[in-house]
Every structure is written in C-alpha cells, then in structure tokens.
Amino acid sequence: MKINKLLWNNKLHSLTFISAIIGIAVFFSTTKDICSEVNKSIMLGDAQQLSKYLCSMVEMSVLGKEGYFSKVQAESILSEFFKTNPPKDFTVKQGGSTSENTKFSIGTYTTAGGIFKIYYVVKKDQENEFVYKLTIEKK
C-alpha cells in the first residue's frame, strides 16, 4: 500500500513537472519579438499592422513631418508614405538594446523611387513593448 502511494506521488510529480515544462515552452514559442514584427510590417508596407506596435503618442519624423502623433495620426502618415513609396526591400543594418527597457533598429528601405533610412526605438513599460520613436529619411 505504501509503495503504491509512493509510486502514485512520483507519477504526479513527474506529470506536474512535464506539464510545467510544456507550458513554458508554449509561452515562449507564442511570444513574438516586437522588432521582428515591426520589421515585417515595414517590409510589407503595412501601416495598419505597424500601428499596432506604436505607443499611444509616438515621436515621428517622416520626410519632414515631425512631432508627436497619436496612433491614428501616425498610421495615416505611414500609410501615405507606404502608398507613395511601396516597398521593394527592407534590410536591417543594425539593431540591439541600449538598456533593459529599450531596443533600437536601423534599416534600409528600398523602393522604386529611392532608398530610405528607417530608425525606430522600442521601449518596454511594465508589461508591453511599443515603438515610441520612428524616423524615416531619404538617403
């Protein structure tokens, strides 16, 4: 009786441990890296998708339009940019972290009309990461 109880407890502990490992693996496999998602949105020229990763007020400079813009305003500006300059290619040239809470990316955006440098900075609050600064300038 005691042996059966010990075996049962060991099986329960093993199942609990395996379940925890599977849960952690599923969590990390479904967590998306914001920079790769932002880069994908830029490569597709998808302002609507890109705006999902912007903070509520984003500092932007897009070909002379500079200031702090709401997500809706920023999406409109980016939509116009992508419409006028449809993507051919977007290549990240440099990226990394400047602190625990901040990441950055610098890339080259190629269109039929020219080449642009795109720079953005991502900041993390308590739970989420958002793009809080975005610059697009002609090379």
Image (cartoon, rainbow, N blue to C red):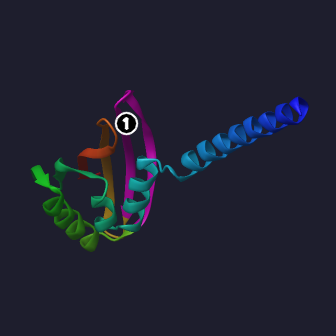
Number of disc labels: 1
Q: Residue at x 32, y 60 (%)?
A: 50
Q: Which residues are magenta?
A: 88-110
Q: Nearer the viewer, residue 54 or 109?
A: 54
Residue 62 percent location from the top left of the image? 19, 55
Q: Is residue 64 visible?
A: no
Residue 60 percent location from the top left of the image? 17, 49
Question: In the rendered view, would you say 95 is above or below 92?
Answer: above
Residue 139 percent location from the top left of the image? 29, 51
Q: Secondary structure at mark 1?
A: strand
Q: Nearer the viewer, residue 18 or 86?
A: 18
Q: Is residue 97 magenta?
A: yes
The chief SS type of the magenta part is: strand
Q: Residue at x 69, y 40 (%)?
A: 16
Callout 1, which amino acid? Lys
Q: Is residue 66 visible?
A: yes
Residue 19 percent location from the top left of the image? 67, 45
Q: Residues within 10 Å of mark 1 (few under 14, many from 20)?
A: many
The residue carrying mark 1 is: 103
In which quadrant of the rendered view does residue 10 lie? Answer: top right
